[in-house]
Each structure stands twice: as C-alpha cells, then as structure tokens.
Image (cartoon, rainbow, N blue to C red):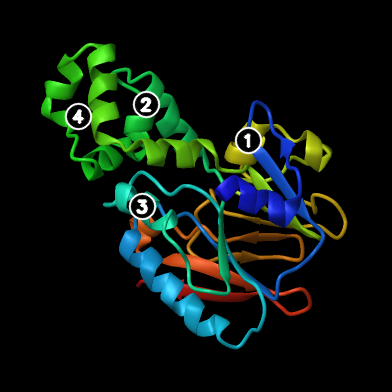
Amino acid sequence: MLQSLMRSLFGTPKPAAPDRQRLTTPEWPSVIYAIGDVHGCLAELKGLEQAIYADGAMFEGDKWIVMLGDYVDRGPDSAGVLDHLMSPVPPGYRRICLAGNHETMMLAFLEEPLSGSDWLRFGGHQTLLSYAIDEQSGYFDAQTVEQRRQILDNHVPRRHVDFMRGLPVYLRVSNMVFVHAGLRHGVPLEQQSERDLLWLRPGDDAPFEPGIVVVHGHTPAATPTLSPWRIGIDTGAAMTGVLTSVRLTQHGDPEILQVGN
C-alpha cells in the first residue's frame, strides 16, 4: 500500500544503490512540515504533530509531513515511534518517512548481531530495551550469533523491519531536497551515494547547487539552521527534549515549530 501511494505521488522512483528509492516531484502540496531526528522520543513526536495539525488548519489542500530519518536509538521508545509512524494521519495529510543512518545500523545489527557492535554504542541499547531485550544483562551476549538473531526475530516485529527497509533515501519537491544527512558538493543529485545521503555532515561554505535548498537532520545543533541554501532541524531531541519541525510553502518564508524545553 505504501509503495503504491509513493508511485501515485511521484511516479516510478529511481532506485538508489543498492535498493532505496529516490523520490522526485515537481509539484508542491499546499504546505510541507519537515520533522527532524526523533530518536525514540514518542511523546515529543506526538506533541509536535498536534502543533502541526493546529498550524495546518490555515492551509487548504494537501499537507505533507516529511520525516527526515533517525526514528530509533537513544530515546526511550523507539519501538513506539515506529508503530506510530506506521499509523494513519488525519484526512488531508500525508506522512512521508525517509531513511536515516540509525535505521540502517539497526537493520545491519538485526542481520548480524555481533558483540561490541557500533550500533549498541550509538544508542541501540535503548532501542533493544524498547523491545524488552536487555543486552546488558549478560544473557543476550552469552548466546551465539544465531541465537541472538532468533531472540531479535521474536521481539522485533517483522512490520518494523520491512518499514525500515522500505524507507526512501531522499525526496525532491521542485527546488527543495529533503534528506537525512546532506548532499556532497560537485556530485549531481541522482549520483549522490547512499552513504553520503545518510552520513554526510553538511558545510555552510556554498549552496549544493544554485537555487536548491537542502532540508536535513543528522547534525544536531542547539538551534535550527536557516540559510538560503540549507535548513537543518536536528535539535538533539533525545538529549535536549526539543523536537523541531519547519513549515515550508512554495512562496513563503520557513517557519519553525518546536516542542520541549
């Protein structure tokens, strides 16, 4: 159903290496709300969505919520966040979820749950706890890799795995590119590597391409970045309690919406 909706919105997507979709449409909806890195902060996500729905009442027509990736790790309820992102949105809204590097790290761990995994150090422990798996108790670590994989299969719903595997890597709407991490200068958009799209730390030295605005998360900052060519809205929700969205319209100025301290 999700893939058929994507096709109806954006046509046949261009595959990313190895398999993530890259979505492009020349048409703007009435308004887009992009949301930065959630990192397991379900309460903040629900609160920010309520603020978006209240703000969106002034707009007629299609309203999109674009999630910029990193739904899991660090915060208290990664499993709940994934469940929520798979739930319906109110009439008139569409939610488009992009991939983040933490989803790809989690998927790699589910395939090969090795002791000392980098994913565990980057917040994966909190994600396992949200699925009632305590890998720090010693029991999980004492199992073989195959036994650990079986424990994970028994606790992490297949629908969560399929959801993360199916996330597109970017969305381009006219002159706006929504992506988790950033774009590498000098590389055409269609040729950007998936690793850069998920991991690159953006710089302020120059626009990616004249007229293009990149909207991203991944690089946390105390306040959102609003420049003529880059909008960064990762405000470190799992550490600060602040989750950020930016409201974008075809002709208006960006407006920031936030919940938290």
Residue ID at (71%, 65%): 227
Q: Name the residue under label 4.
A: 135
Q: Earlier in the sequence, mark 3 or mark 1?
A: 1
At mark 1, the secondary structure is: loop
Q: In this view, does 41 lie above or below 135?
A: below
Crowdedness of circle 4 by 10 Å Cα count: few (<14), some, many (20+)? some
Q: Earlier in the sequence, mark 4 or mark 1?
A: 1
Q: Which of marks 3 and 2 is in front?
A: 3
Q: Which of marks 3 and 4 is in front?
A: 3
Percent from the top left, x then y, of residue 249? 71, 75
Q: Which of marks 3 and 4 is nearer the N terminus?
A: 3
Image disc number at residue 110? 2
* C-alpha separation, residue under disc 2 versus residue under disc 1: 18 Å
* C-alpha separation, residue under disc 3 versus residue under disc 2: 18 Å
* C-alpha separation, residue under disc 3 versus residue under disc 4: 22 Å
* C-alpha separation, residue under disc 4 versus residue under disc 1: 30 Å
**Identity of the amino acid at label 2?**
Leu
Q: Mark 3 points at which residue?
A: 83
At mark 4, the secondary structure is: helix
